[in-house]
Amino acid sequence: MAVPKDCPAPDVVRSAYAQLAVTDLAASRWFWVDMLGFHVQCETKDALHLRGTDELTHHSLVLRQNDVAALDHISYRVRTPEDVERAARYFDALGCPVRRVPAGKGTNGVGDAVRVVDPLGFPVEFFYEIERAERLIQRYDLHRGAQIARLDHFNICTPDIPAAYEHYRGLGFGCSETIEGDEHELYAAWMFRKQTVHDVAFTGGAGPQLHHVGVATHESHQVLRTADIFGALHAEHHIERGPGRHGVSNAFYVYLRDPDGHRVEIYTSDYYTGDPDHETYRWNVHDDRRRDFWGNAVIESWYKEASPVLDLDGVPQPISATILDESAVKVGADGLG
Ligand code: DHY
């Protein structure tokens, strides 16, 4: 997958929003709005546009009613309006399907956008323009449930992690952390444009599939509070893994599954990565602390289950099996093999 010559990559600012296809909008609203505390910015007959308390743009999550649950697309904000066209030319040069989506024809609140199926098989959007939204940071009276502050990252399942790493390096992403075998085989990587641990991470597994959307709270007590609220309402089956502390990223976390099985990570307290000489931190796949710093086992569903992804016409993409299976590495925390 060569980087196209004379065709600069778009300047990506950050992971901006995920659009999920869901099968029961009322059930999704209970989960994402009532339980997680997302703010409803815009509601139509068949979609909810949501944002966290710190977000100053129209949405960071869109839930769209559909017959099948899947990922519609992940979306990156780029630095200038010209970068949108740059994205179109870049992915066209890579031989990927590219579609221009003018303002008003795509997702509410978003201006001219470009949607592609990237070389990894994921539906990805690039946009510059988006409606601004009222500041809610200090509207503590409106902060509910998990008190989600903002979208943090996407985590995608892909069978060929080195190919994903190379693709995102081509798009100018830095790499904060990896999980590697004894011969430096790449099992997982965390890559960023904004100055945190990641905007996107890769989990080895059958793909293309969405592993999870990561959303940030300000403090670890909000992660614990989230688990407590699900327990209190006897909705504990939505808690899949954690709470705990990650080795990779040092973040405090809990993973939940929404009513359609889409996974979300409530995530807080990672670190700054913005220096130009920031070095990649490499974990060995045999280090039991890499995924859970306290050595707690990663349950099988976390490695094996994920959301299908749609193509640009809304058709589910075919899925290929993984090449390197981290869950088969027989060591303490992950002795699943
Ligand atoms: C890890 C997973 C994530 C993340 C940071 C670190 C490692 C792990 O525990 O599996 O989803 O955001």
Image (tube, rainbow, N blue to C red):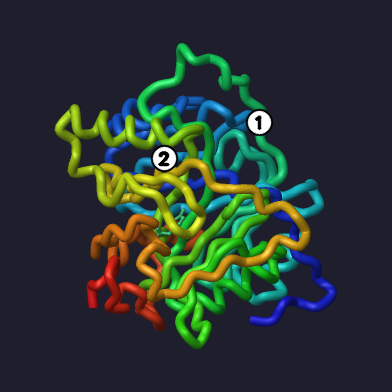
Point out residue 316 in the picture as x, y percentages from the top left corner.
Answer: 38, 63
| Residue 49 at least partly seen | no
Residue drawn at (49%, 39%) of the image: 216
- Element under label 1? loop
Q: Residue at x 53, y 53 (%)?
A: 74
Q: Position of residue 125 (x, y in %)?
A: 60, 54
- CA separation, marks 2 and 1? 18 Å
> Residue 131, which numbered label?
1
Q: Which residue is mark 2?
A: 63
Foreground pick, 279 / 236: 279
Residue drawn where x is 60% and y is 61% of the image: 176
Mark 2 C-beta to ligand 1 under 8 Å: no
Q: Which image quarter holds the C terminus? A: bottom left
Question: Looking at this view, is 101 or 93 the one in front?
Answer: 93
Kind of residue sitting beneath label 2:
Leu
Query: Quarter for ligand 1?
Result: bottom left
Question: Which badge, 2 or 1, comes first in the chain's sequence?
Answer: 2
Hey, which residue is sitting farthest right in the picture?
Answer: 6
Image coords of residue 117 (percent x, y): 55, 65
